[in-house]
Amino acid sequence: MIEKKIVVLVSGGGTNLQALINAEKAGELGNGKITCVIASKADAYALTRAEKANIKTRTLIRKDYADIASYSAAMRDMLLEEQADLVVYAGFMTILDEQVCDTFKNKMINVHPALIPSFCGKGFYGLHVHEEALKKGVKVSGATVHFVTAECDAGPIILQKAVEVKEGDTPETLQKRIMEQAEWKILPLAAKLFCDGKITVKDGKTIISE
């Protein structure tokens, strides 16, 4: 099989990017290779992580663009230049419009720190997700990897992993447990399944073949 080029989009510290880098080093990305990391902020620590791993980096600064349409068009062009086979959102905080989502339909994945359809959609990001989960008193939360569409957190679900919510949890302790036990495991696995040609989308649902 021809190697699949993975381009990772980041905005912050890049812990999910690190999980992907570690997976690649361990031979756990299958047919995939991280070929470029694109950041929406020039000071994103994720860029340092990429440089340390000898991965090409680029920046496309959100505030340099007047609106989401012009930013999305620029991102689409950059992803096409990089010949991305798979685009991974790893803590990427901008919702791109259909110019990107349609060009890379079922080729963009995101990890969300809850079990979709719970605690997802516009405004549910970072600690907000865990604050709301704890307010509701849920006994389990977790993470979901899904394909990205123009509608926030609404694309076909690829993988989910549940994580126990413990008595006395704070949003911070829950966030850490979900990252360590779920996000960092299922995001690299979903990338591997995609790059190995194991995911099919039918009627808005994914089928994962053995």
Image (cartoon, grey):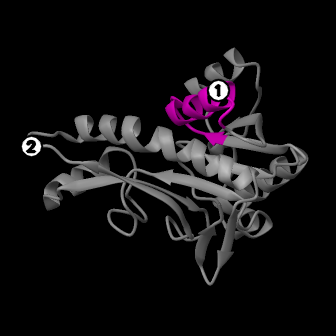
- In the rendered image, the residue lying farthest to the top is 52
Look at mark 2 in the image and give the residue it sits on.
Answer: 167
Residue 201 horizontal side relative to residue 31, left or right: left
Q: How many marks?
A: 2
Q: Give the spatial CA distance, label 1 vs label 2.
A: 35 Å
Where residue 179 sits, quadrant-wise, is top left
Q: Amino acid at mark 2?
A: Glu
User: How dense is the environment of label 1, judged by Cα within 10 Å: few (below 14), some, or many (20 and up)?
Assistant: few
| Label located before the other in sequence (1 or 2) | 1
- Relative to 182, residue 200 above or below: below
Badge 1 marks a residue whose secondary structure is: loop
- In the rendered image, the residue lying farthest to the left is 167
* Residue drawn at (76%, 19%) of the image: 54
* Residue drawn at (65%, 48%) of the image: 191
Q: Which mark is residue 26?
A: 1
Disc number lying in front (1 or 2)? 1
| Magenta part of the chain | 9-28
Looking at the picture, how far across and down is residue 176, in whole percent?
A: 32, 34
Looking at the picture, how far across and down is residue 41, in whole percent?
A: 61, 34
Residue 85 horizontal side relative to residue 95, left or right: right
Residue 117 can be seen in this image: yes
Where residue 207 sits, quadrant-wise, is bottom right
* Residue drawn at (65%, 43%) of the image: 9
Q: Amino acid at mark 1?
A: Ala
